Image (tube, rainbow, N blue to C red):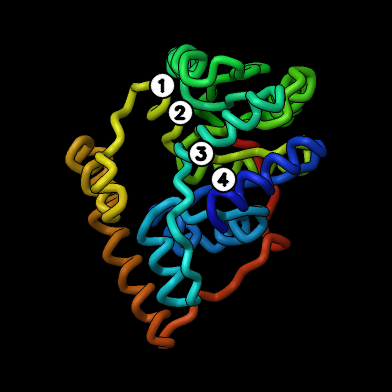
Amino acid sequence: MDYAAAVESIMSAARDRTALAITALAVHGVMTGFLDPVHRRRLNGIDLVLPDGQPVRWALRWIHGVRLPDRVYGPDLTLRLLEVAAGEGLAVFFYGSTAEALQALVAKLQQKVPRLRIAGIEPSKFRRLTASEKQMVVDRIRSSGAQLVFVGLGCPRQEIWVYEYRNLLSMPLLAVGAAFSFHSGTLQQAPRWMQDAGLEWFYRLLREPRRLWRRYLLLNPMYLTVVILEALRLYRVPVLFPDGCEPEESHG
């Protein structure tokens, strides 16, 4: 799916107040599902899984012959959706990150998208929520008047969140990765040429080596190996469906 199709599908669900779970996955997000069978079932239960990273888009072409003109990058998709929502007067909700980061995000978005209606914001508690806390989150989002929820909890917590809340909220729920940090200005994006070349991971590794070295130096070679084996028809990842997911306390 490309940007145009993704925006139309998501906005159609928002207009109709229909439940829809969406995530945009780069290599790290894909590999969380590859390594964890329970999480793989969750990802297979999400309505739209979009190719956030260029290596994911390339793998779709090599393995499945899907020739997308571009990736569907979470931060860019977020901005496109906010612009459409602002034009149509649809209210949005931001869930995740810290209170300070959300306030910075709102301030920046009010400059970028002046007509945007923000129904509410809620920071993460950075722990599992109890059943009663989860219900209170649902009630607050419902009563806010929001028609789209953007979720920035980091991978894989944000995918768990949209999977768990999908049937509780009649609106699109989007796991958008680092979009909150990029659009608030708290995290710098890689230059466009590095993004297009599939080198965004290298830029982020240089900026946060202690936090990200395991993610990129271990998972990237593993991803490339599996992609090559699949492209050569020497290996096939077992398909697991969401019915096997065990219930758990909600992430927040």
Estimate the spatial distance between the alpha carbons at disc 1 and disc 4, rounded to whole Å: 21 Å
Q: Disc 3 marks which amino acid? A: Val
Estimate the spatial distance between the alpha carbons at disc 2 and disc 1, rounded to whole Å: 6 Å
Q: Nearer the viewer, residue 241 or 61?
A: 61
Q: Is residue 56 left or right of residue 132?
A: left
Q: Closer to the N terminus: mark 1 or mark 4?
A: 4
Q: Name the residue under label 4.
A: 159
- Viewport quadrant of the C terminus: top right
Q: Closer to the N terminus: mark 4 or mark 3?
A: 4
At 41% from the left edge and 69% from the top edge, which residue is drawn?
A: 59
- Between circles 4 and 3, the one closer to the viewer is 3
* Contact (Cβ within 8 Å) of mark 2 with mark 1: yes
Q: Where is residue 180 in the image (x, y as percent from the top left)?
A: 45, 28
Q: Closer to the N terminus: mark 1 or mark 3?
A: 3
Q: Disc 2 marks which amino acid? A: Phe
Task: Give the crowd class for mark 4: few <14, some 14-19, many >=20 residues within 10 Å.
Answer: many
Q: Disc 1 marks which amino acid? A: Ser
- Viewport quadrant of the N terminus: bottom right
Estimate the spatial distance between the alpha carbons at disc 2 and disc 3, rounded to whole Å: 8 Å
Q: Name the residue under label 2.
A: 180
- Between circles 1 and 4, the one closer to the viewer is 1
Residue 219, located in which quarter of the rendered image? bottom left
Q: Where is residue 128 in the image (x, y as percent from the top left)?
A: 58, 32
Q: Disc 4 marks which amino acid? A: Glu
At 44% from the left edge and 72% from the top edge, which residue is drawn?
A: 61
Q: In this view, does 207 lie to the left or right of 62?
A: left
Q: Which of 113 and 151 is in front in this view?
A: 113
Q: Mark 3 points at which residue?
A: 176
At 50% from the left edge and 71% from the top edge, which residue is drawn?
A: 66
238 vs 244: above or below: below
* Contact (Cβ within 8 Å) of mark 4 with mark 3: no
Estimate the spatial distance between the alpha carbons at disc 4 and disc 3, rounded to whole Å: 9 Å
